[in-house]
Image (cartoon, rainbow, N blue to C red):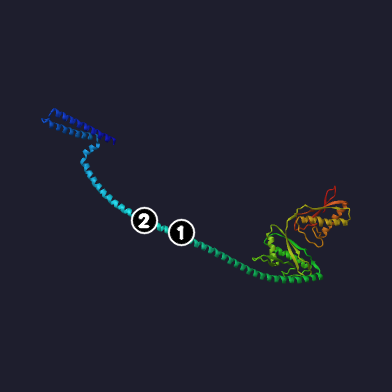
């Protein structure tokens, strides 16, 4: 832009200078009355001025052609540019028409857009109204749901109370049925107790008039049973053995498989669903399998002992009970059981009595401490019982050796073999070791 302005200013200045110079030349030629080509001076001045103007135009054109590529392009392509200008004018006219058309279309589109915006606003208003109605309906639905939930809770509560009352009614009905059963059971037990009372009166009369063949707590039989599926068979064999013993003493054969003994029935209480205690009688038929199951569940050998439950007189069936014990090892072979000091200077009767007391007191105490199972003997209770002439002779021999010492000696009972809780422990498996002060101990042979 600066270049163009500078160029135009220079052109104006040069053109002014040329005009001034031509005018000056024409006046000088007019003053001097110079002629050119034989023309009059006035015409000569006109010609010179005209030529000067032509020179200015030519100089201007030449300068523009020299310094302006656009001018050269204009001179060179003038007709084409005019044609192009005409085409551009036509295109410009078409574009203006198209612009007007587009303007009309834009105005139409804007009108439609405004209508659409107005419709959208209406739709938005309708939507807001719908949302308000929806919120109102939702609030109403929520309110109805809460009411329905409250009604459901109330219905469940009423249903629960109804079910509770039904259960209580069923429980009351069950208690009534249980009470009826208890009443019937009480009548049964009452009748049984009445029969037992009659039997007791008869037993008292028998005790007065008949000899007693078995005392309460007396042991009739015992056996070591190994836990197995055949435990019930072993229990019945033990009962058969006890029955034979009592039958030989004069007991009556009963109806329970023709035995002279009967296991005493148990009166057991058990709870019911109503909380009322229920009594039931466990008879011999149920007790035998129960005893067998206890033996089968044991981890080791079991000692089953049959004892008399109540005094029995001749001509009656004997009531018995069965006790179970673990048959643990009580003493090992060669173990000292007990010891005592006996004075050999006493009489034979005194030494014998001291030796018997040693067996019944010290040996028995050691056996009970080792968890051995005592055997009730009405004649000689306790361990260390003497049975048979051989054991009695051994006891007399021990008395003589103590007497021969003539002074106090220490008598120690030592086992000859392993002894278990079931026993026996007597002079058949015990040795007497007699120790004199200052003399080596010796055993009884």
Whole-percent x, y for residue 24 in the image: 18, 30
Residue at screen point 36% across, 56% down: 118
Crowding near pointer 2: few (<14 within 10 Å), some, many (20+)? Answer: few
Disc 1 secondary structure class: helix
- Residue 325 is drawn in which quadrant? bottom right
Whole-percent x, y for residue 116 in the image: 35, 55
Q: N-terminal of the two: label 2 or label 1?
A: 2
Crowding near pointer 1: few (<14 within 10 Å), some, many (20+)? Answer: few
Residue at the outermost left position: 38
Residue at screen point 50% across, 61% down: 143
Position of 181 with respect to 373 (left or right) is left
Residue at screen point 21% across, 32% down: 16
Residue at screen point 21% across, 42% down: 82
Quadrant housing the C terminus? bottom right
Of residues 60 and 210, the one nearer the viewer is 60
Position of 314 with respect to 6 (left or right) is right
Of residues 136 and 267, the one nearer the viewer is 136
Whole-percent x, y for residue 228 in the image: 68, 60
Residue for badge 2? 118
Quadrant housing the N terminus? top left
Of residues 64 and 183, the one nearer the viewer is 64
Residue at the outermost top position: 32
Residue for badge 1? 135
User: Marks 2 and 1, Cα distance to the nearest angstrom?
Assistant: 25 Å
Disc 2 secondary structure class: helix
Decide: is 305 above or below 437: below
């Amino acid at each position: 832009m600066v270049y163009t302005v500078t160029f135009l200013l220079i052109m104006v200045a040069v053109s002014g200078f040329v005009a001034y110079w031509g005018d000056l030349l024409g006046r000088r030629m007019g003053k001097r009355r110079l002629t050119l080509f034989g023309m009059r001076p006035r015409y000569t001045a006109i010609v010179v001025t005209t030529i000067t103007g032509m020179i200015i135009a030519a100089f201007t054109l030449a300068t523009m052609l020299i310094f302006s590529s656009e001018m050269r392009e204009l001179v060179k392509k003038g007709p084409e540019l005019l044609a192009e200008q005409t085409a551009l004018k036509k295109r410009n006219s078409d574009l203006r028409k198209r612009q007007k058309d587009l303007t009309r279309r834009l105005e139409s589109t804007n009108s439609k857009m405004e209508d659409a915006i107005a419709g959208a606003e209406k739709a938005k208003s309708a939507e807001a109204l719908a949302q308000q109605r929806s919120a109102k309906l939702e609030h109403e639905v929520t309110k109805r749901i809460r009411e329905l939930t409250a009604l459901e809770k109330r219905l469940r509560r009423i249903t629960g109370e109804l079910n509770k009352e039904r259960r209580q009614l069923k429980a009351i009905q069950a208690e009534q049925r249980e009470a009826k059963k208890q009443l019937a059971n009480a009548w049964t037990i009452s009748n049984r107790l009445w029969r037992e009372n009659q039997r007791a009166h008869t037993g008292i009369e028998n005790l007065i008039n008949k000899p007693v063949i078995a005392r309460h707590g007396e042991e009739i039989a015992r056996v070591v049973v190994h836990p197995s599926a055949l435990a019930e068979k072993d229990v019945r064999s033990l009962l058969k053995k006890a029955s034979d013993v009592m039958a030989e003493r004069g007991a009556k054969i009963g109806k329970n498989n023709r035995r002279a003994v009967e296991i005493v029935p148990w009166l057991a209480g058990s709870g019911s669903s109503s909380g009322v205690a229920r009594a039931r009688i466990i008879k011999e038929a149920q007790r035998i399998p129960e005893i067998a199951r206890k033996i089968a569940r044991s981890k080791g050998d079991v000692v089953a002992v049959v004892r008399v439950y109540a005094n029995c007189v001749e001509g009656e069936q004997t009531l018995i009970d069965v006790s179970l014990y673990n048959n643990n090892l009580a003493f090992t072979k060669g173990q000292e059981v007990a010891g005592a000091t006996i004075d050999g200077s006493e009489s034979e009767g005194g030494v014998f009595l001291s030796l018997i007391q040693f067996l019944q007191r010290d040996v028995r105490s050691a056996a009970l401490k080792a968890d051995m199972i005592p055997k009730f003997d009405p004649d000689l209770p306790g361990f260390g019982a003497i049975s048979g002439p051989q054991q009695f002779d051994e006891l007399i021999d021990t008395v003589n050796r103590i007497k021969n010492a003539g002074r106090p000696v220490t008598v120690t009972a030592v086992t000859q073999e392993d002894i278990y809780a079931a026993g026996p422990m007597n002079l058949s498996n015990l040795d007497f070791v007699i120790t004199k002060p200052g003399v080596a101990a010796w055993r009884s042979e």
